[in-house]
Image (cartoon, rainbow, N blue to C red):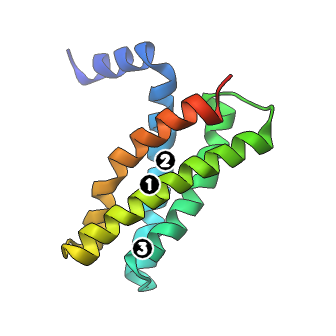
Amino acid sequence: MGPRQFINRLFNRYPKFSTYLLIGGSAAAVDLLAFVILFNLFDLSAVTSNILSVSIATVESYTLNALYNFRTTDKILFRFSSFVAVSALGLIIGSSLIYLLHNMLGIDGNLAKIAVMPPVVLVQFLLNKHISFRQ
């Protein structure tokens, strides 16, 4: 099975998760770019850079998921609040892991940020699917 067939199969079998991954990829790119700029150019701490970059990416991710993935236009305040709560949980988990990896173990802050992203994304998808965008 080639890459294109694999991607088609993934989208057909798990359309919401696949779209979530695409939107998440966009949000992750925004998150990572903002982190790199804040950490490397503005010389903010890794944890502070993470808090700010995740906050920026959260707004983008909510908007795109509400409009294009879960297609919800009702209960906007509840959905946004729960999405932010899920993002805050991801932020706490991610920041704690970045602190552990960077500050305690001496791993480069950029690498620590990249390492913590996949598990946080998975937890957030599951919580958002079952709470924030529940139909």
Measure the C-alpha gap from mark 1 to mark 2. 5 Å
Residue beneath the point at 55% across and 51% down: 87
Q: Where is residue 9 in the image (x, y as percent from the top left)?
A: 35, 14
Name the amino acid type tagged 1: Ala
Res. 88 visible in picture: yes
> Which corner quadrant holds the N terminus?
top left
Mark pair 3, 1: CA separation: 18 Å
- Contact flag, marks 3 and 2 (Cβ < 8 Å): no
Which comes before the other along the chain, label 3 or label 2? Answer: 2
Regarding mark 2 in the picture, which secondary structure is present there? helix
Q: Disc 1 designates what residue? A: 29
Q: From where the camera sits, is residue 60 visible? A: no
| Secondary-structure class at tag 3 | helix
Residue 26's tag is 2
- The Cα atoms of the two marked residues, 3 and 2, are separated by 21 Å
* Label 3: few (<14), some (14–19) or many (≥20) C-alpha neighbours in 10 Å: many
Q: Name the residue carrying label 3.
A: 47
Q: Where is residue 6 in the image (x, y as percent from the top left)?
A: 29, 19
Check contact, mark 1 vs mark 2: CB within 8 A: yes
In this figure, what is the number of numbered marks? 3
Which disc number belongs to residue 83?
none
Name the amino acid, label 2.
Ser
- In depth, the one of 129 and 54 nearer the eye is 129
| Residue 14: percent from left, percent from top | 44, 19
Q: In which quarter of the image is residue 95?
A: bottom left
Return the x and y of residue 47 as percentages of the image width and height: 42, 73
Circle nearer the N terminus (3, 1): 1
Q: In which quarter of the image is residue 39?
A: bottom left
Q: In which quarter of the image is the C terminus?
A: top right
Q: Kindly identify the residue that appears in the image at 25 percent across and 64 percent down.
A: 111
